[in-house]
Amino acid sequence: MLTTQLLYGLAACFIVALGLRTALLHASLLHRVIAINVMGAGVFMLLIAVAYRGPGQQPDPLPHALVLTGIVVAVSATALALALARRLAAEHDDD
Amino acid sequence: MTDAIIWVVALPLAGALAALLLPRLATAVAVGTAVATSVSAAALLRGVATQGVLHYELGGWSAGLGIALRADGLSAMLLMMTALVVLAASIYTSAYITAPAERARFWPLWLLLWTALNALLLSGDLFNLYVTLELLGLSAVALAAFGGKRAAVAAALRYLLVGLLGSMMFLAGVSLIYAGYGTLDMAQLAHMVTAGPTAWTALALMTAGLLLKTALFPLHFWLPPAHASAPAPVSAVLSALVVKAAFYLVLRLWLHVFADVVTPAAANLLGALGAAAVLWGSWQALQAERLKLLAAYSTVAQLGYLFMFFPLLQALPSVTARDVAAGGLVMLALTHGFAKAGLFLAIGIIQQRSGHDSIQQLDGTAQRLPATTFSIALAGVALIGLPPSGAFLGKWQLLAGAVATGQWVWVVVTAIGSLLAMAYIFRVIGHAFGHQSYPNLPVTVAREEWPALLLAAVAVLGLGLAGAPVWQLLEIRV
Amino acid sequence: MNLDTWLPLLVVASSLLPGLIIFFLREDSHRLRTVLNLAGAGLKLLLVGIMIWGVFHEHVYETRWTLAPGLDLVLHADTLSVLFVTLSTVLWLVTTIYAIGYLENSPHRSRFFGFFSLCVSATVGLALAGNMFTFVIFYELLTLATYPLVAHRGTPEAVRGARIYLAYTLGGGMLLLVGTVWLHVLAGPTAFVEGGTLSRLPAEYHQQLQAIFVLLIMGLGVKAALVPLHGWLPQAMVAPAPVSALLHAVAVVKAGAFGIVRVVYDVYGVNFADQLGLLTALGIAAGITIVYGSVRALLQDNLKKRLAWSTVSQVSYIALGTAILGPVGTVGGIVHLVHQGIMKITLFFAAGNYAETLGIHSVSEMNGVGRRMPATTLAFSVAALGMIGVPPIAGFVSKWYLGLGALEAGMATWVIPVLLTSSALNAAYFLPILYRAWFRDPGPAWPAEHIPAARLETSAALLWPPLVTATLALAAGLFAAAPYSPLEWAALIAQREYGL
């Protein structure tokens, strides 16, 4: 149903906004990384909402492919961020 | 010659894998790949010049479903600049990074960065752009943190987070576009996109994300520390190419895909931010105590000039006038790429020889390295926009467009920005003159000094004197 | 290989290529450097000779290269460019010889002569510029080429003086650029055409044209040392004497004055400029500069500074000549371009000789120097008398034509007093020097006798150039009516400008 799509879409926007707010305002590194991941989740949800074509119909596969790619990218980026953060923390302990 | 379009992406990728698998031969593999890719880029440029826009569909999947590569005049020129800069920087790095363990780690990342850049410049659809943006961002961050020094890692982390934020916003915009128009292919979208809430929001999101990545004022805060702490060749590529790639995307979106959506007010906003970038960046460069910080702030300022073209392109009445101004924009971007890369490589040499890059203590080193100092002077001339550099022609078009549309504020900002640039460049060059003499030291150019010198020479003489084809090539567009 | 297309470029290249090679020579490659310099100068002289002959016979020499849509780099030889090119070439040759002698055993000679050659290339390119776009390019190149010369000694004062020089000249360049871009937007690529091209523009543009004129003159006035844009000139005296000689007689200051002449005659057209009221404004600025420069010169004890202020004053005669409507005034202004160049370079050569030979830097140290260095002081005297306007030396001819032109143009009421006051002030600051040099007894010892008295009073390379240029100054005055003299050539320029 179209209202469902709208609901998902709005929820997605809300999640994105939530993630954005925390990413911009929170100082802690871990919070920021998680917030960006939450933002990512929100955007992926948006894409899934976009893929809805109607009741009983096959959803559009293209956005699903995009979401999968996006998840891979997000995971890699998070890994890099955490690796850098760990290196930074290690250096901090050595000081 | 359609094959050249896939070679420029495939070669660096293959090179990266080869360098990873053959760590002891990594440098040779990398430099070899660099040469081969540059030849392919030249072939691509030639192909575009003679045959017009070139297409390639990966795996035969048609547009909309598959990955389409498209090369027009603009992308071919930027690709050629990328190739030459990376080639020069690679030769430089072969002498700069000598420890085998470091080399084994460096070259794969470097070549991946190049792959991402080339793929980005050739992408024909929005999602592919997102993927290449991410690849670019990740490899750039890894390179920026290379060496493991605390300042570099901290700056790289900030760069990463900012980059991710930008990418997420970009992806959100892409989703909206797909929701509204059902396709992600840029050529198709150019015909389909009309003004409306979907288009506005999508453009705003995508632009915001890209502005973060291109470090436009006031979203530039991450750039100076990141570029100043990275190793010299990485700084060169970051300043000259990576931020330029994000700018290229803004240009594509605003001029081609969303051309009907853009309003004068929005263009003026970009112009105003660009003006602020010019003034703030130039001022900060003047205050900088270190050469690399000066160069990084200079990048912030130079990108501002590029954004000041937007209100002009919006307001110029005739298509020919717009094309001439757009050519000036591209000329400025190309010149900056070469000049900034040359500058960072030259600074790298100074840093290696004297152990620091402090401006106050520059005297002895600058005087013992005449070729490097001359490279800095040449690059500086191009950054200021003095003749005969290509930037002079670009600034001329900026001024002419501003006068023609009666938008005098850009003239004033350009004048002040140029004067500030003169001040911070000549502050550095003044240290080249001392009263100690180094008798009978002939002016020789060491192997590692050549790349910087050649890059600066291209910026000042090559583009300045032989730059007319830029306008001709720009007319070949999707 | 069509000579018509290549000649202007070759004239520029004849000093550019030797200069580029010289950069890479070792410091002690004295002979090779000299050969390259003199070969380049000789070749340039030959090419300029061909050019003079050709332009006189209405031959067209033009090199054109497109840099961007609507922006062509044009090197074009017309009567005015040939005048300036000849002056530059002859004086470069003389200054090169002088510089070889002056800088013997100084550090960084290769760098010096490299930039020296670049400087002359830029000057010649500026002289041959065929439109405002090309002019602006070479104007900025000139700044870039002269900066290392001013900073050459590398002392903190030199670097500081060079920085001030740069601040002024680059600022002026910016104004010139904005004015030129504006002009381009209004009137398209403005080629230099005798009689100007802007009068054909509709009346609603006149206000903008006036504003553009102000911008252009301000930009040019920095190099031409128009008050109040002259501040860099006394500061640039930290440069070695050959540089001061070149800067003040040939390159930088003349480039500014030459630009003013170009803008008034070949862009706006002298009648149109007068119509817009621009000539009066220019004349007033010139008049103020003439008097102010002379007054400040009076107050200086340092010889080079006194000569610097004298330059500030004297170059504005050219601007004054431009401001006087009518062929006679035009002739006076243009011929002074050449005359002032020859006379001032003589004075700077002499000042350099005093400093190098005897360590004399100020006027008060010059007592009795005429007995120790008679030839140099004779050259100095001839040039100084020419500056004052004593016949038959060249300076008199220029002043005569300026006065006559002012009378014809009805501007005599204020121009003549300015000329007379300036001549009086010139006498006031030159004659005492001559008196000291010839008629006072020298002190117990010279400040620092670097070159002892031998068969010649100083080294040959330092002695001959001022003698040659002093003779030229005398000849230009005595033989002013001869064909191919500077005066005749200036008359030819005026003739073609006014369409007579």
Image: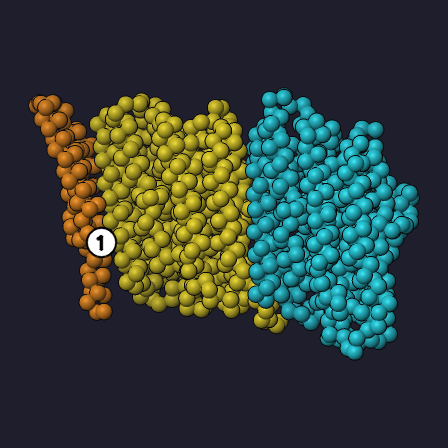
In this orientation, which residue lies closer to the viewer: B303 or B92?
B303
Q: Is residue B295 above or below residue C201?
A: below
Q: Position of residue B395 (x, y in %)?
A: 51, 40
Q: Is residue C26 above or below residue C206?
A: below
Residue drawn at 42 percent across, 28 percent down: B314
In this picture, residue B418 sits left or right of residue B194? right
| Chain shown in yellow | B
In this picture, residue B174 sits left or right of residue B434? left
In this picture, residue B377 sits left or right of residue B167? right
Query: For residue C133, which quarter of the picture?
Result: top right
| Chain shown in orange | A
In this picture, residue B261 sits left or right of residue C120? left
In this orientation, which residue lies closer to the viewer: B343 or B14?
B343
Residue drawn at 62 percent across, 29 percent down: C209
Q: Which residue is mark 1?
A: A80
Task: Quarter of the image for the C terminus of chain B: give it.
Answer: top left
Could you tell me if residue B128 is visible in this image?
Answer: no
Residue drawn at 60 percent across, 59 percent down: C161
Colour chosen for chain C: cyan
Query: For residue B123, which quarter of the picture?
Result: top left
Q: Position of residue B80 (x, y in %)?
A: 45, 44
The secondary structure type at the circle numbered 1 is helix
Chain letter, disc 1 residue: A
